[in-house]
Amino acid sequence: MSTHRKLTEKKIVLASHNAGKVRENAALLAEYGVEIISAKDLGLPVPDETETTFLGNATLKAVAAAKASGMVALADDSGFSVAALDGAPGVYTADWAEQPDGSRDYKTAMTKVEKLARHAPDRAAWFTCALVLAWPDGHTEGFEGKAMGEWIWPPRGERGFGYDPMFVPTGGAQTFSEMDPEEKHKISHRANAFAMLAEACLKD
Ligand code: IMP
């Protein structure tokens, strides 16, 4: 018997201010008849990501949104890891793209990864996505999905975002940025994490 708590609410908060993530997660949840409202629409504050793990940061965001809204909240945290860099940039993936003016530039971030890892023979890399559901009573359910592969240089493709142009999933020939987005979404770290969450908390 499952020891996971089931989601019975039909409307939850998505603890993200990122429109892309809100759209992607809304589509996944819609299949289960769950509607979402974004943290931005509710005017909820954005907590600092002070934890050192993906699950830690996703939990922190979900718990803060659940407490502030009184509703069940879903949060995610994701990033890119390189084996030769001991898993960096990892939870600091977005920080590596940060520019002095506060904007994010992924070409610069990818160049930094390549510069640090270029002499290492091990090309293994992976994306991680942690998804956490938090209830207003403090209960949480967390899941972590991965997409394993290798990093390549130079970057290729125009269809993805972030570090997609330098990542080729295991068994594939195209980067995440060259692939049809539909194909990426079938095998991505986010899809894997969501499948675990759905199995544990959404299915009867
Ligand atoms: P978050 O918003 O704190 O989860 O930061 C995620 C970071 O990881 C951002 O810098 C994203 O660009 C990067 N990232 C997460 N998922 C992906 C992906 O599927 N492709 C490329 N980059 C990703």
Image: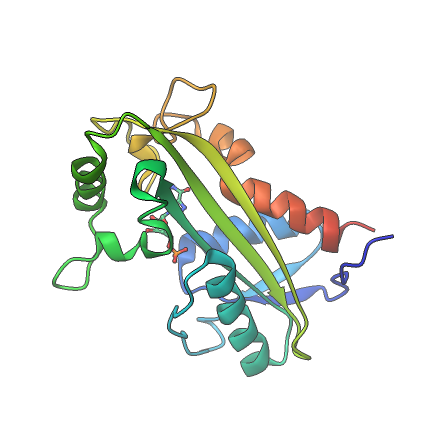
Name the spot of residue 136 as percent of width and height, x first.
65, 78
Can see residue 38?
Answer: no
**54 on left or right of 91:** right
Residue drawn where x is 31% and y is 37% of the image: 84
**162 on left or right of 61:** left
Please identify the residue farthest to the right as the structure is shown.
1
Q: Is residue 92 above or below residue 64?
A: above
Of residues 105 and 182, the one drawn nearer to the viewer in this rendering? 105
Looking at the picture, the colour scheme in use is rainbow
Can see residue 26?
Answer: yes
Residue drawn where x is 39% and y is 70% of the image: 50
Name the spot of residue 47 as percent of width and height, x first.
41, 75
Please tell me how many numbered marks the rendered image carries.
Answer: 0
Residue drawn where x is 46% and y is 78% of the image: 44
Name the spot of residue 21 as percent of width and height, x first.
45, 53
Residue drawn where x is 64% and y is 70% of the image: 72
Name the spot of residue 111 as percent of width and height, x first.
17, 39
Of residues 12 and 41, the one drawn nearer to the viewer in this rendering? 12
- Quarter of the image for residue 160 reads top left
